[in-house]
Image (cartoon, grey):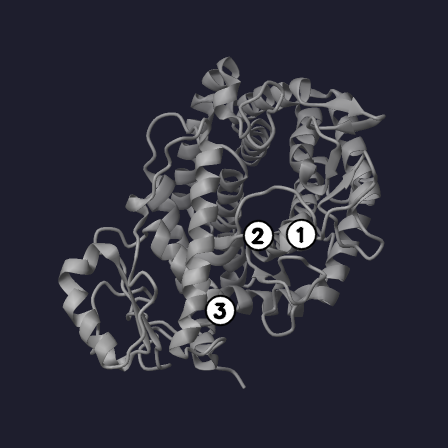
Protein backbone atom coordinates (compact mmCIF):
# COMPACT_ATOMS: atom_id res chain seq x y z
CA UNK A 1 0.00 0.00 0.00
CA UNK A 2 1.34 3.42 -0.97
CA UNK A 3 1.34 5.93 1.87
CA UNK A 4 0.51 9.55 1.18
CA UNK A 5 3.15 12.22 1.73
CA UNK A 6 2.84 14.60 4.64
CA UNK A 7 3.26 18.36 4.48
CA UNK A 8 3.22 18.66 8.27
CA UNK A 9 3.84 16.21 11.14
CA UNK A 10 1.06 17.76 13.24
CA UNK A 11 -1.38 15.17 14.56
CA UNK A 12 0.42 12.21 12.99
CA UNK A 13 2.00 10.92 16.20
CA UNK A 14 1.91 11.64 19.93
CA UNK A 15 5.14 13.34 21.07
CA UNK A 16 6.52 11.99 24.33
CA UNK A 17 9.32 14.53 24.73
CA UNK A 18 9.27 18.31 24.48
CA UNK A 19 12.60 19.77 23.37
CA UNK A 20 12.88 23.53 22.99
CA UNK A 21 15.38 25.16 20.64
CA UNK A 22 17.31 28.25 21.78
CA UNK A 23 15.46 31.24 20.34
CA UNK A 24 18.78 32.89 19.56
CA UNK A 25 20.05 30.02 17.35
CA UNK A 26 17.82 27.37 15.79
CA UNK A 27 20.94 25.60 14.46
CA UNK A 28 22.69 25.49 17.85
CA UNK A 29 25.25 22.68 17.65
CA UNK A 30 24.28 21.25 21.03
CA UNK A 31 20.61 21.16 20.07
CA UNK A 32 21.49 19.38 16.82
CA UNK A 33 23.50 16.77 18.70
CA UNK A 34 20.57 16.18 21.06
CA UNK A 35 18.15 15.89 18.13
CA UNK A 36 20.57 13.46 16.49
CA UNK A 37 20.54 11.10 19.46
CA UNK A 38 16.74 11.23 19.72
CA UNK A 39 16.29 10.48 16.01
CA UNK A 40 18.71 7.57 16.15
CA UNK A 41 16.87 6.11 19.14
CA UNK A 42 13.49 6.79 17.54
CA UNK A 43 12.25 8.80 20.54
CA UNK A 44 9.18 10.83 19.59
CA UNK A 45 9.82 14.52 20.26
CA UNK A 46 7.67 17.51 19.33
CA UNK A 47 8.06 18.96 15.83
CA UNK A 48 6.27 22.08 14.65
CA UNK A 49 4.47 22.47 11.33
CA UNK A 50 7.84 23.14 9.65
CA UNK A 51 9.37 19.91 10.96
CA UNK A 52 11.51 21.86 13.46
CA UNK A 53 12.00 21.78 17.21
CA UNK A 54 9.79 24.58 18.62
CA UNK A 55 11.12 27.55 20.57
CA UNK A 56 8.17 27.64 23.01
CA UNK A 57 5.80 24.99 24.37
CA UNK A 58 2.89 24.36 21.96
CA UNK A 59 0.74 22.81 24.71
CA UNK A 60 0.73 22.18 28.46
CA UNK A 61 3.88 20.49 29.76
CA UNK A 62 1.74 17.78 31.33
CA UNK A 63 1.16 16.41 27.80
CA UNK A 64 4.74 15.10 27.74
CA UNK A 65 6.68 12.48 29.67
CA UNK A 66 9.75 14.71 29.93
CA UNK A 67 11.02 18.13 28.88
CA UNK A 68 14.47 19.29 27.70
CA UNK A 69 14.93 23.06 27.58
CA UNK A 70 18.11 25.06 26.87
CA UNK A 71 19.75 26.65 29.88
CA UNK A 72 19.21 30.07 28.30
CA UNK A 73 15.47 29.68 29.05
CA UNK A 74 15.92 29.08 32.79
CA UNK A 75 14.56 32.44 33.92
CA UNK A 76 11.50 31.99 31.72
CA UNK A 77 10.54 28.39 32.45
CA UNK A 78 12.08 27.41 35.80
CA UNK A 79 8.82 27.65 37.75
CA UNK A 80 6.91 25.77 35.04
CA UNK A 81 9.44 22.93 35.07
CA UNK A 82 9.34 22.73 38.86
CA UNK A 83 5.55 22.42 38.72
CA UNK A 84 5.87 19.76 35.95
CA UNK A 85 8.24 17.78 38.18
CA UNK A 86 6.02 18.06 41.28
CA UNK A 87 3.10 16.75 39.21
CA UNK A 88 5.06 13.60 38.33
CA UNK A 89 6.93 14.61 35.18
CA UNK A 90 10.55 13.52 34.72
CA UNK A 91 13.47 15.93 34.35
CA UNK A 92 17.07 15.02 33.53
CA UNK A 93 20.03 15.19 35.89
CA UNK A 94 20.97 18.72 34.76
CA UNK A 95 17.35 19.91 34.35
CA UNK A 96 18.48 22.01 31.33
CA UNK A 97 20.84 21.31 28.46
CA UNK A 98 23.77 23.67 27.73
CA UNK A 99 23.94 25.60 24.47
CA UNK A 100 26.99 25.51 22.23
CA UNK A 101 28.02 29.03 23.28
CA UNK A 102 28.73 27.66 26.76
CA UNK A 103 31.37 25.20 25.49
CA UNK A 104 35.03 26.26 25.40
CA UNK A 105 37.49 25.42 22.60
CA UNK A 106 40.50 26.96 24.35
CA UNK A 107 43.69 25.13 25.26
CA UNK A 108 44.44 23.39 21.96
CA UNK A 109 47.29 23.97 19.53
CA UNK A 110 45.29 22.98 16.45
CA UNK A 111 41.78 23.60 15.24
CA UNK A 112 41.33 19.88 14.58
CA UNK A 113 42.05 18.95 18.18
CA UNK A 114 39.76 21.67 19.49
CA UNK A 115 36.97 20.59 17.16
CA UNK A 116 37.22 16.91 18.01
CA UNK A 117 37.38 17.54 21.76
CA UNK A 118 34.25 19.65 21.63
CA UNK A 119 32.37 17.55 19.04
CA UNK A 120 33.18 14.16 20.58
CA UNK A 121 32.45 15.42 24.07
CA UNK A 122 29.20 17.00 22.91
CA UNK A 123 27.94 13.86 21.21
CA UNK A 124 28.87 11.61 24.14
CA UNK A 125 27.13 13.95 26.59
CA UNK A 126 23.92 14.16 24.57
CA UNK A 127 23.92 10.41 23.92
CA UNK A 128 23.97 9.96 27.69
CA UNK A 129 21.28 12.59 28.11
CA UNK A 130 18.99 10.97 25.54
CA UNK A 131 19.57 7.54 27.08
CA UNK A 132 18.56 8.94 30.48
CA UNK A 133 15.08 9.54 29.08
CA UNK A 134 14.38 5.84 29.58
CA UNK A 135 13.69 6.84 33.18
CA UNK A 136 10.69 8.77 31.86
CA UNK A 137 9.33 5.65 30.17
CA UNK A 138 9.79 6.93 26.61
CA UNK A 139 9.23 4.56 23.72
CA UNK A 140 12.29 3.59 21.69
CA UNK A 141 11.85 3.26 17.92
CA UNK A 142 8.40 4.84 18.15
CA UNK A 143 6.55 3.42 15.15
CA UNK A 144 4.21 6.33 14.38
CA UNK A 145 7.04 8.84 14.79
CA UNK A 146 9.29 6.95 12.40
CA UNK A 147 6.51 6.53 9.86
CA UNK A 148 5.77 10.24 10.04
CA UNK A 149 9.39 11.08 9.24
CA UNK A 150 9.40 8.63 6.34
CA UNK A 151 6.35 10.27 4.76
CA UNK A 152 7.83 13.73 4.40
CA UNK A 153 8.03 14.60 0.67
CA UNK A 154 11.48 14.03 -0.79
CA UNK A 155 11.39 17.29 -2.73
CA UNK A 156 10.91 19.22 0.52
CA UNK A 157 14.06 17.67 1.95
CA UNK A 158 15.96 18.60 -1.20
CA UNK A 159 14.69 22.18 -1.11
CA UNK A 160 15.80 22.46 2.52
CA UNK A 161 19.25 21.05 1.71
CA UNK A 162 19.56 23.62 -1.07
CA UNK A 163 18.59 26.42 1.31
CA UNK A 164 21.19 25.24 3.81
CA UNK A 165 23.85 25.30 1.10
CA UNK A 166 23.03 28.89 0.24
CA UNK A 167 22.92 29.85 3.91
CA UNK A 168 26.39 28.37 4.47
CA UNK A 169 28.18 29.00 1.21
CA UNK A 170 26.05 30.84 -1.32
CA UNK A 171 27.13 34.32 -0.26
CA UNK A 172 30.70 33.50 0.77
CA UNK A 173 33.18 36.33 0.36
CA UNK A 174 36.99 36.14 0.20
CA UNK A 175 39.26 33.07 -0.11
CA UNK A 176 37.74 29.74 0.89
CA UNK A 177 39.99 28.19 3.54
CA UNK A 178 37.70 25.44 4.84
CA UNK A 179 39.28 22.46 3.10
CA UNK A 180 39.01 18.74 3.79
CA UNK A 181 36.58 15.92 3.10
CA UNK A 182 33.45 17.66 4.54
CA UNK A 183 33.88 20.53 2.06
CA UNK A 184 34.74 18.06 -0.70
CA UNK A 185 31.56 16.15 0.12
CA UNK A 186 29.41 19.29 0.15
CA UNK A 187 30.63 20.47 -3.26
CA UNK A 188 30.59 17.07 -4.99
CA UNK A 189 27.03 16.52 -3.80
CA UNK A 190 25.99 20.04 -4.72
CA UNK A 191 27.44 19.75 -8.23
CA UNK A 192 25.63 16.48 -8.86
CA UNK A 193 22.32 17.76 -7.43
CA UNK A 194 22.44 21.02 -9.38
CA UNK A 195 23.28 19.26 -12.64
CA UNK A 196 20.49 16.72 -12.19
CA UNK A 197 18.02 19.52 -11.41
CA UNK A 198 19.42 21.76 -14.16
CA UNK A 199 19.61 24.38 -11.42
CA UNK A 200 21.73 27.22 -12.83
CA UNK A 201 21.46 29.34 -9.68
CA UNK A 202 22.88 26.53 -7.54
CA UNK A 203 25.67 25.91 -10.05
CA UNK A 204 26.57 29.61 -10.06
CA UNK A 205 26.75 29.60 -6.27
CA UNK A 206 29.05 26.57 -6.38
CA UNK A 207 31.18 28.26 -9.03
CA UNK A 208 31.62 31.32 -6.79
CA UNK A 209 32.75 29.11 -3.93
CA UNK A 210 35.20 27.16 -6.09
CA UNK A 211 36.66 30.42 -7.36
CA UNK A 212 37.13 31.32 -3.71
CA UNK A 213 39.07 28.05 -3.27
CA UNK A 214 41.19 29.07 -6.25
CA UNK A 215 41.77 32.46 -4.59
CA UNK A 216 43.30 30.63 -1.62
CA UNK A 217 45.74 28.51 -3.66
CA UNK A 218 48.70 30.93 -3.50
CA UNK A 219 48.20 31.31 0.24
CA UNK A 220 47.98 27.54 0.71
CA UNK A 221 51.12 26.81 -1.27
CA UNK A 222 52.96 29.58 0.58
CA UNK A 223 51.89 28.36 4.02
CA UNK A 224 50.60 24.81 3.59
CA UNK A 225 50.47 23.91 7.28
CA UNK A 226 47.53 26.27 7.78
CA UNK A 227 45.55 24.30 5.19
CA UNK A 228 46.37 20.80 6.41
CA UNK A 229 44.30 18.72 8.79
CA UNK A 230 47.51 17.76 10.58
CA UNK A 231 49.91 20.75 10.83
CA UNK A 232 53.10 18.78 10.09
CA UNK A 233 55.42 18.96 7.04
CA UNK A 234 54.50 16.36 4.42
CA UNK A 235 51.02 15.74 5.85
CA UNK A 236 49.16 17.41 3.00
CA UNK A 237 46.35 14.86 3.05
CA UNK A 238 42.67 15.69 3.25
CA UNK A 239 42.92 19.12 1.68
CA UNK A 240 45.27 19.60 -1.23
CA UNK A 241 44.22 16.42 -3.01
CA UNK A 242 40.46 16.84 -2.46
CA UNK A 243 40.39 20.50 -3.48
CA UNK A 244 42.73 19.77 -6.40
CA UNK A 245 40.42 17.04 -7.64
CA UNK A 246 37.36 19.22 -7.17
CA UNK A 247 38.80 22.10 -9.18
CA UNK A 248 40.02 19.90 -12.04
CA UNK A 249 36.68 18.09 -12.23
CA UNK A 250 34.63 21.29 -12.22
CA UNK A 251 36.91 22.91 -14.75
CA UNK A 252 36.47 19.93 -17.05
CA UNK A 253 32.70 19.99 -16.67
CA UNK A 254 32.47 23.72 -17.37
CA UNK A 255 35.35 24.08 -19.82
CA UNK A 256 36.97 26.74 -17.62
CA UNK A 257 40.74 26.25 -17.75
CA UNK A 258 41.38 28.48 -14.72
CA UNK A 259 39.84 25.87 -12.42
CA UNK A 260 41.93 23.14 -14.01
CA UNK A 261 45.18 25.08 -13.61
CA UNK A 262 44.59 25.74 -9.92
CA UNK A 263 43.59 22.13 -9.41
CA UNK A 264 46.81 20.98 -11.08
CA UNK A 265 48.86 23.17 -8.73
CA UNK A 266 47.24 21.72 -5.60
CA UNK A 267 47.34 18.12 -6.78
CA UNK A 268 50.97 18.45 -7.89
CA UNK A 269 51.96 19.74 -4.45
CA UNK A 270 50.19 16.75 -2.90
CA UNK A 271 51.86 14.30 -5.29
CA UNK A 272 55.33 15.73 -4.67
CA UNK A 273 55.15 15.99 -0.88
CA UNK A 274 53.12 13.13 0.52
CA UNK A 275 54.18 9.72 -0.75
CA UNK A 276 56.87 7.46 0.64
CA UNK A 277 57.64 3.76 0.78
CA UNK A 278 57.57 1.81 4.01
CA UNK A 279 58.63 -1.83 3.98
CA UNK A 280 58.34 -1.71 0.19
CA UNK A 281 54.75 -0.46 0.23
CA UNK A 282 53.85 2.90 -1.30
CA UNK A 283 51.91 4.96 1.24
CA UNK A 284 50.48 8.44 1.50
CA UNK A 285 51.28 9.12 5.15
CA UNK A 286 53.96 8.40 7.73
CA UNK A 287 52.38 5.43 9.35
CA UNK A 288 52.61 1.68 9.70
CA UNK A 289 48.93 1.46 8.72
CA UNK A 290 47.67 1.11 5.17
CA UNK A 291 44.19 2.66 5.25
CA UNK A 292 41.37 1.84 2.89
CA UNK A 293 40.44 5.52 3.06
CA UNK A 294 43.94 6.56 1.97
CA UNK A 295 42.58 6.62 -1.58
CA UNK A 296 41.27 10.19 -1.20
CA UNK A 297 44.12 11.38 -3.42
CA UNK A 298 43.60 8.85 -6.20
CA UNK A 299 41.08 10.90 -8.23
CA UNK A 300 43.40 13.92 -8.20
CA UNK A 301 46.29 11.78 -9.44
CA UNK A 302 44.27 10.39 -12.35
CA UNK A 303 43.03 13.87 -13.24
CA UNK A 304 46.65 15.09 -13.18
CA UNK A 305 47.57 12.53 -15.81
CA UNK A 306 44.52 13.46 -17.87
CA UNK A 307 45.42 17.16 -17.89
CA UNK A 308 49.23 17.05 -17.89
CA UNK A 309 49.85 13.90 -19.91
CA UNK A 310 52.31 12.61 -17.27
CA UNK A 311 51.58 8.93 -16.84
CA UNK A 312 53.56 8.63 -13.62
CA UNK A 313 50.72 10.19 -11.64
CA UNK A 314 48.20 7.60 -12.84
CA UNK A 315 50.73 4.81 -12.23
CA UNK A 316 51.09 5.96 -8.61
CA UNK A 317 47.31 6.07 -8.22
CA UNK A 318 46.92 2.60 -9.67
CA UNK A 319 49.54 1.19 -7.29
CA UNK A 320 47.78 2.82 -4.32
CA UNK A 321 44.38 1.39 -5.28
CA UNK A 322 45.71 -2.11 -5.91
CA UNK A 323 47.58 -2.03 -2.59
CA UNK A 324 44.45 -0.98 -0.73
CA UNK A 325 42.37 -3.69 -2.41
CA UNK A 326 44.96 -6.36 -1.71
CA UNK A 327 45.52 -5.39 1.92
CA UNK A 328 42.14 -4.11 3.14
CA UNK A 329 39.28 -5.45 0.98
CA UNK A 330 37.88 -8.76 2.15
CA UNK A 331 37.03 -11.58 -0.23
CA UNK A 332 33.31 -10.87 0.32
CA UNK A 333 33.74 -7.21 -0.72
CA UNK A 334 33.71 -5.39 2.64
CA UNK A 335 36.67 -3.21 3.62
CA UNK A 336 38.79 -3.23 6.75
CA UNK A 337 39.72 0.28 7.84
CA UNK A 338 43.43 -0.59 7.81
CA UNK A 339 46.12 -3.23 7.77
CA UNK A 340 49.25 -2.87 9.87
CA UNK A 341 52.56 -3.27 8.06
CA UNK A 342 54.12 -4.11 11.41
CA UNK A 343 52.11 -7.18 12.38
CA UNK A 344 49.45 -7.63 9.68
CA UNK A 345 46.55 -6.86 12.03
CA UNK A 346 43.37 -5.52 10.50
CA UNK A 347 41.02 -2.74 11.53
CA UNK A 348 37.29 -3.30 11.84
CA UNK A 349 34.92 -2.91 8.90
CA UNK A 350 34.05 0.63 9.96
CA UNK A 351 31.15 2.29 8.14
CA UNK A 352 33.09 4.95 6.22
CA UNK A 353 35.81 2.42 5.44
CA UNK A 354 33.21 1.08 3.00
CA UNK A 355 32.51 4.53 1.58
CA UNK A 356 35.85 6.20 0.94
CA UNK A 357 37.50 3.60 -1.33
CA UNK A 358 34.28 3.30 -3.34
CA UNK A 359 34.07 7.10 -3.55
CA UNK A 360 37.68 7.35 -4.71
CA UNK A 361 37.23 4.73 -7.40
CA UNK A 362 33.94 6.26 -8.55
CA UNK A 363 35.63 9.63 -9.02
CA UNK A 364 38.67 7.99 -10.59
CA UNK A 365 36.55 6.22 -13.20
CA UNK A 366 35.14 9.61 -14.22
CA UNK A 367 38.70 10.76 -14.90
CA UNK A 368 39.99 7.78 -16.86
CA UNK A 369 36.71 6.85 -18.55
CA UNK A 370 34.16 4.56 -16.90
CA UNK A 371 34.69 1.72 -19.39
CA UNK A 372 38.44 2.15 -19.79
CA UNK A 373 40.35 -1.17 -19.71
CA UNK A 374 42.67 0.45 -17.16
CA UNK A 375 39.75 0.71 -14.72
CA UNK A 376 38.58 -2.91 -14.84
CA UNK A 377 40.14 -3.78 -11.47
CA UNK A 378 38.28 -0.84 -9.90
CA UNK A 379 34.97 -1.85 -11.49
CA UNK A 380 35.37 -5.36 -10.08
CA UNK A 381 36.16 -3.96 -6.65
CA UNK A 382 33.16 -1.63 -6.39
CA UNK A 383 30.81 -4.36 -7.66
CA UNK A 384 32.07 -6.70 -4.92
CA UNK A 385 31.46 -3.96 -2.37
CA UNK A 386 27.86 -3.37 -3.42
CA UNK A 387 27.18 -7.10 -3.40
CA UNK A 388 28.46 -7.22 0.18
CA UNK A 389 26.43 -4.16 1.17
CA UNK A 390 23.27 -5.89 -0.01
CA UNK A 391 24.04 -8.81 2.31
CA UNK A 392 24.82 -6.62 5.33
CA UNK A 393 22.02 -4.05 4.95
CA UNK A 394 19.90 -3.76 8.10
CA UNK A 395 16.41 -4.94 7.05
CA UNK A 396 14.60 -2.58 9.44
CA UNK A 397 16.58 0.63 9.03
CA UNK A 398 17.73 0.05 5.47
CA UNK A 399 21.11 1.42 6.54
CA UNK A 400 24.45 -0.06 7.48
CA UNK A 401 26.06 -0.32 10.88
CA UNK A 402 28.92 1.59 12.47
CA UNK A 403 30.80 -1.71 12.27
CA UNK A 404 29.31 -2.98 9.04
CA UNK A 405 29.42 -6.69 9.79
CA UNK A 406 28.24 -6.34 13.40
CA UNK A 407 24.48 -6.00 13.27
CA UNK A 408 24.21 -5.00 16.93
CA UNK A 409 26.41 -1.91 16.50
CA UNK A 410 24.76 1.47 15.94
CA UNK A 411 23.31 2.48 12.56
CA UNK A 412 25.41 5.13 10.77
CA UNK A 413 24.22 7.64 8.17
CA UNK A 414 27.20 9.30 6.47
CA UNK A 415 28.41 6.10 4.81
CA UNK A 416 24.90 5.28 3.60
CA UNK A 417 24.38 8.72 2.03
CA UNK A 418 27.79 8.56 0.35
CA UNK A 419 27.29 5.03 -0.94
CA UNK A 420 23.95 6.01 -2.47
CA UNK A 421 25.72 8.94 -4.14
CA UNK A 422 28.32 6.52 -5.56
CA UNK A 423 25.61 4.10 -6.67
CA UNK A 424 23.89 6.83 -8.66
CA UNK A 425 27.12 8.00 -10.32
CA UNK A 426 28.10 4.39 -11.13
CA UNK A 427 24.65 3.81 -12.63
CA UNK A 428 25.12 6.90 -14.81
CA UNK A 429 28.42 5.43 -16.04
CA UNK A 430 26.92 1.94 -16.59
CA UNK A 431 29.35 0.43 -14.11
CA UNK A 432 26.40 -0.86 -12.08
CA UNK A 433 23.04 -2.06 -13.40
CA UNK A 434 19.68 -1.68 -11.66
CA UNK A 435 20.00 -4.69 -9.34
CA UNK A 436 20.53 -2.47 -6.27
CA UNK A 437 17.55 -0.16 -6.76
CA UNK A 438 15.52 -1.84 -4.01
CA UNK A 439 18.50 -1.68 -1.66
CA UNK A 440 19.09 2.02 -2.25
CA UNK A 441 15.38 2.89 -1.97
CA UNK A 442 15.23 1.15 1.40
CA UNK A 443 18.34 3.05 2.48
CA UNK A 444 16.71 6.36 1.58
CA UNK A 445 13.77 5.47 3.83
CA UNK A 446 16.22 4.97 6.69
CA UNK A 447 17.93 8.28 5.95
CA UNK A 448 14.58 10.06 6.09
CA UNK A 449 14.17 8.85 9.67
CA UNK A 450 17.47 10.56 10.51
CA UNK A 451 16.97 13.79 8.54
CA UNK A 452 16.68 17.18 10.25
CA UNK A 453 16.98 20.68 8.74
CA UNK A 454 19.23 19.79 5.81
CA UNK A 455 21.50 17.35 7.65
CA UNK A 456 21.62 13.84 9.05
CA UNK A 457 21.69 12.35 12.54
CA UNK A 458 23.80 9.31 13.45
CA UNK A 459 26.90 10.47 11.59
CA UNK A 460 30.13 9.01 12.97
CA UNK A 461 32.29 11.81 14.33
CA UNK A 462 35.80 12.15 12.91
CA UNK A 463 38.32 9.57 11.78
CA UNK A 464 40.91 7.66 13.79
CA UNK A 465 42.04 4.09 14.37
CA UNK A 466 41.95 1.49 17.11
CA UNK A 467 40.78 -1.98 17.99
CA UNK A 468 37.24 -3.15 17.31
CA UNK A 469 35.93 -1.69 20.57
CA UNK A 470 37.15 1.72 19.46
CA UNK A 471 34.96 1.55 16.34
CA UNK A 472 31.97 0.19 18.25
CA UNK A 473 32.08 3.13 20.65
CA UNK A 474 32.65 5.99 18.20
CA UNK A 475 30.63 9.13 19.03
CA UNK A 476 27.85 9.93 16.57
CA UNK A 477 26.02 13.19 15.98
CA UNK A 478 24.58 15.62 13.46
CA UNK A 479 26.28 16.35 10.14
CA UNK A 480 25.12 19.05 7.74
CA UNK A 481 27.60 18.44 4.92
CA UNK A 482 26.65 15.07 3.45
CA UNK A 483 26.05 13.48 0.05
CA UNK A 484 22.29 13.58 0.67
CA UNK A 485 21.39 16.48 -1.70
CA UNK A 486 22.59 14.55 -4.75
CA UNK A 487 20.79 11.41 -3.57
CA UNK A 488 17.54 13.32 -3.13
CA UNK A 489 17.88 15.13 -6.45
CA UNK A 490 18.27 11.87 -8.36
CA UNK A 491 15.07 10.50 -6.83
CA UNK A 492 13.02 13.68 -7.18
CA UNK A 493 13.76 13.84 -10.90
CA UNK A 494 13.52 10.10 -11.39
CA UNK A 495 16.97 9.98 -12.97
The C terminus appears in which quarter of the rendering? bottom right
Q: Can residue 59 be seen in this view?
A: no
Q: In this view, does 235 lie to the left or right of 178?
A: right
Q: Report the residue marked by disc 3.
A: 41
The N terminus appears in which quarter of the rendering? bottom right
Q: Which residue is at the front of the view, 204 or 121?
A: 121
| First along the sequence among labels 1 and 2 | 1
Q: Report the residue marked by disc 1.
A: 350
Question: How far separated are the C-alphas under marks 3 and 1?
Answer: 20 Å
Percent coordinates x, y for residue 178 in the rendering? 44, 32
Look at the numbered discs 1 and 2 and tell me whether their residues touch, using CB distance below 8 Å.
yes
Question: How far separated are the C-alphas under marks 2 and 3?
Answer: 16 Å
Q: In this view, does 379 lie to the left or right of 133?
A: right
Q: Nearest to the eye among marks 1 and 2: give it.
A: 2
Residue 7 occupies which quadrant of the picture?
bottom left
| First along the sequence among labels 2 and 3 | 3
Percent coordinates x, y for residue 92 in the rendering? 34, 66
Q: Please give the label number shown on residue 474.
A: 2
Q: Badge 2, how many Cα within 10 Å: few under 14, some, many 20+?
A: many
Q: Which residue is at the front of the view, 23 or 398?
A: 23
Q: Which residue is at the front of the view, 450 or 184?
A: 450
| First along the sequence among labels 3 and 1 | 3
Amino acid sequence: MTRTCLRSPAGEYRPEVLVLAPEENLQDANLLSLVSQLLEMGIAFELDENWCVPTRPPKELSAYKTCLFPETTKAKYDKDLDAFYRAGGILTFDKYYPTAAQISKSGFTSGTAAYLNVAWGRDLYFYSLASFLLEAGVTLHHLQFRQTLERRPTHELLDECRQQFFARAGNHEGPWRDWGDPAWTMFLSGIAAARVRKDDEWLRAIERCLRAIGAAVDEALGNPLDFQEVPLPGAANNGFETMGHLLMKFGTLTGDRSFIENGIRLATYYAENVFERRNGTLMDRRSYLVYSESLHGVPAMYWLTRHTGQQAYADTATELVKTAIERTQRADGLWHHFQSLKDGSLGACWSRAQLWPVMAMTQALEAIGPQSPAGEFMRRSVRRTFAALERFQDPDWGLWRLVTDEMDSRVESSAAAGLLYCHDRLREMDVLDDRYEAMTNLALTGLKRLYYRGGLAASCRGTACGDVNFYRSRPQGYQLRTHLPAVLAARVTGS
